Each structure stands twice: as C-alpha cells, then as structure tokens.
Image (cartoon, rainbow, N blue to C red):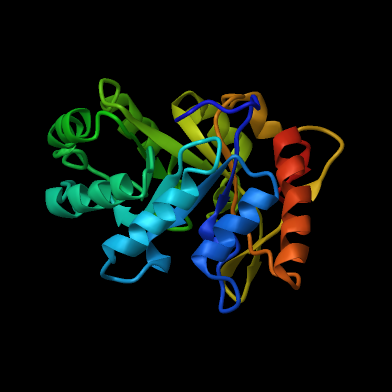
Amino acid sequence: MQETAYSVPIYVTANSLVNERVSLMDAIEIARNAGADGFEVRRELLPARLDAAEVEAVRQQLQMFPSSAAYSIPLSLFREGRFEREPLQRALTEARAFGCRLAKFSPIGVERGESAFAGLDDLCALVRGEAAEMMVTVENDQSLVSGDLDLWTRFFARAADCSIRMTFDLGNWLCVGGDPLQAAQRLGRYVTYIHAKSVELSAGQCVAHPIRAAATAHPAFAYLPGNVPRAIEFPISVGTHDEISTALRSYVNLLRSGNFATS
C-alpha cells in the first residue's frame, strides 16, 4: 500500500458510516474530512451488479486519500479444504476496478483435518500470479473457526511461501471467547492490516461499539507491526454529516495514538 505522511495510516471502513442517511460517496467524503488516510470499501454494501460509471466515480474519490483503498469481500478463501477460483478472481477484479491495493477475505474456511489445506498450493500460485500487485489478507471474524489459534498457525506455516497475510480484528477475538493479546503473540508476524472496535455480547450477538481512550497503548500492539494500517470498524451516526466527521476525527486521532481499549 502507498506510504502516507504518518507512520500509522488510519482507515475507515464503509460499514462504520454507511446507513440510510449516509451514502457510500457521503461516507468517503466524511472520512476524508475527518483526516483518515484511507478507506475500506465493503462488497456487501454494494449492489449485486456494479455499474462501470459508478465504480469509476468511487475510484476517483478514493484516490483523494493519501493511501490506496482496501476492499472487503465476505468470501472465504477455502470451502471444504479447497478454494473456488472464479469467485476469487471476480473479487480481485472488482478490487482493482476501485483502485484497491489490499483485498480482505473472510476466515480461511477450512475444517480441521489432514486435508484442510489441500488447495493451498493452487491458491498461492493464483495469488502470486494474478494478484501479484495486491495484498491478499484473511480476517478473523465472529465465526467459531476464527477462534482456533492452532488452525491459524497451521495455515500461515503452510502458506510461508505465499503472499497471503492477515487482517487482525481486535474486537472479534472477544466475540469468539478468545484473547487478542494471546492471538497477537501467536500471529502478529503475519499481520498487515488491523481492525479496531469494542464489542459486547447481547442476546447471543456480538455488537460493535466505539473504542474508548486508555492511559496506555492496547496491549496487543506490543506484538503487532507498528506501521501497518489500522481501521475504524464501528458504527458512527451522531447527527449531521459535519457532526459525524467531527466525531470520526476524534476516533482517527485515538486509533493513531494506539492508546485505547476494546473491552
């Protein structure tokens, strides 16, 4: 991803801002006005069929940020131990169309067992070839498989010669009963992008909330790369667009400092 004037680029995810009153284009403008360095486009918030003119309009707005955009796709790299080439290629094509240089996929999506990573060699060949100019990452989400540190460790050990890296979501570890500090100790070397939010369990659901200030840096940062992008991923809807931008700016500064808590 492109370098910025800051040592720690701060991103804003589309799902933090987009709602019935804030369009995607509004969200991009709000994030830029709030001092964000980059923006994460979410595939689930886009229409099923993408209009070329609308994609180009979004691309032009994303280019106004200091850092290249990220693209989030709710698609697992693996299904039953093997990856599906066509959906992956389509997702990467969409990411390029928006000018994104990082593509974030859902968890590795495999079952425990000897054949769990049977398709990894073919996947790595595709990533090294067709996605050589892009950073491909997988994220720990709120599914149970995401809490399996042994599975993650095995995956990255097997993918040592592959350019796939990790999006590390600080809040999601808590959603699956995990410990983000322990996860950072085990997986920090593979992390190239960080999501930040506070979470609470309510009626069996994991609900995202804004991070809050703390006197010291989040303990996981002792084991995570200090210069990789950090993204705000919690809902912010506090009034007018200007009011949202003002609130967002405070979170951008807080996330950049690292002095916040997620639990």
Residue 79 is at least partly visible in this image: no
- Total numbered circles: 0
**Residue 27 image position (x, y, % from top left):** 57, 61
Residue 208 location, quadrant:
bottom right
Residue located at (27% from left, 45% from top): 112
Residue 130 falls left or right of residue 220: left
**As drawn, 188 above or below 252:** above
Q: Is residue 48 toward the left or the right of residue 218 in the image?
A: left
Question: Considering depth in this image, is 163 or 175 the residue closer to the camera?
Answer: 163
Q: Which residue lies furthest to the top in this view?
A: 161
The residue at 71%/45% (across/down) is: 252
Q: Which of 224 and 241 is in front in this view?
A: 241
Identify the residue shown where x is 57% and y is 64%: 26
What residue is rendered at 21% in x and 28% in y?
128
The reply, left or right, for residue 119 in relation to residue 36 is left
Q: Where is residue 71 in the image (x, y as percent from the top left)?
A: 40, 49
Q: Which of 37 and 168 is in front in this view?
A: 37
Q: Quadrant of the N terminus?
A: top left
**Can residue 38 be seen from the camera position used here?**
yes
Residue 75, picture quadrant: bottom left
